[in-house]
Amino acid sequence: MTSEKRKNKLPKIAAIQMCSSPEVDENLENANRLIREAVAQGAELIVLPENFAYMGMQDDDRLIHKETFGEGKIQQFLATIAKEKQIWIVGGTIPIAGQHPNKVRAACLLYNDKGSVIARYDKVHLFDAVISNKECYQESKIVEPGHDVVVVDTPFGKLGLAVCFDVRFPALFMQMARQGVEIIALPSAFTVPTGEAHWKILTRARAIDTFSYLIAAGQGGEHANGRKTYGHSLIADPWGRLLAEQTNTGSGVVHAEMDLNWVAQCRKSIPLIR
């Protein structure tokens, strides 16, 4: 869609929910179907969930499918469909080779409608947590943390990138706000216990903190490795209102229109940054 046409209508944004498996080809096929569904509903900016292309049987399986930045099956898939459908895509997270040979970066890549990478965010806050006696995680064993805050200009507004556990660290989002962020993409794979307790509170709070639209795309359902993810992919507006939410697990698409005038009105009403 041309920029002139975009000026005459409110852009539609979408969050895709998946229940990804250890099979990359299967996940890419499902992502392809869901992206096309979102496009058919009018979406121009689409966010995929964390680990959308691969949820392995154990954490270090990600090393099997790690890609060099700018090369690889997963990145090629995102570039191709973004160009074909002329949409912007936030590619969840991809295991990208880092400095350590036995670790990866959880890289969130933003593709424009020509299939080019416009921005890369490497997940900063890694999920090292003990949820219960039977459920614990140590993401730092296999993932190198990033360090940079990423906010980039798009035809839809200034877009910030964050991933899952980042949502618990409001300082990251306030740094985005100081850089003028208007839309935040949050690919995620929340656990069920933490999701039930905190998912909506945290996502809505970060939208309110920054007076931005927040697009939270999650994994949802029971995966082959036995892990259960919360789902409830959602879109919140700058006032913290839920514009769309997927309440069932499994795959699906939620979408909403976005109005930057509403962002400006919220910020004028309560000038937090100033």
Image (cartoon, rainbow, N blue to C red):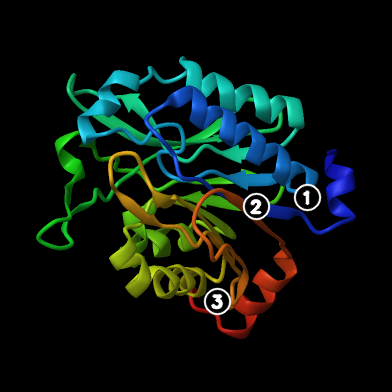
Task: Return the mark for residue 14.
Answer: 2
Give how far across and how far down residue 29 sits, in percent. Answer: 58, 28
N-terminal of the two: label 1 or label 2?
2
> Quick one: SS at disc 2?
strand
Distance from Cα at disc 3 to Cα at disc 1: 24 Å
Distance (Cα) linking label 2 and label 3? 17 Å
Q: Which residue is mark 3?
A: 240
Distance between the alpha carbons at the discs numbered 1 and 2:
9 Å
Which mark is on residue 41?
A: 1
In the visual, does 16 lie left or right of 186?
A: right
The numbered mark, 2 or 3, whose residue comes first in the sequence reads: 2
- How many other residues sit within 10 Å of disc 2, few (<14), some (14-19) or many (≥20)? many
Residue lying furthest bottom: 269
Helix, strand or loop for disc 3: loop
Tell me: residue 3, above or below residue 182: above
Q: Quadrant of residue 129?
A: bottom left
State the residue in front, 118 or 242: 242
Q: Nearer the viewer, mark 2 or mark 3?
A: 2
Amino acid type of the residue that numbered disc 1 sits on in the rendered structure:
Gln
- Amino acid at the residue labelled 2: Ala
Residue 177 in the image, given as x and y percentages of width and height: 48, 63
Pointer 1 with pointer 2, Cβ within 8 A: yes
Location of residue 187 with respect to 258 vertically, above or below = above
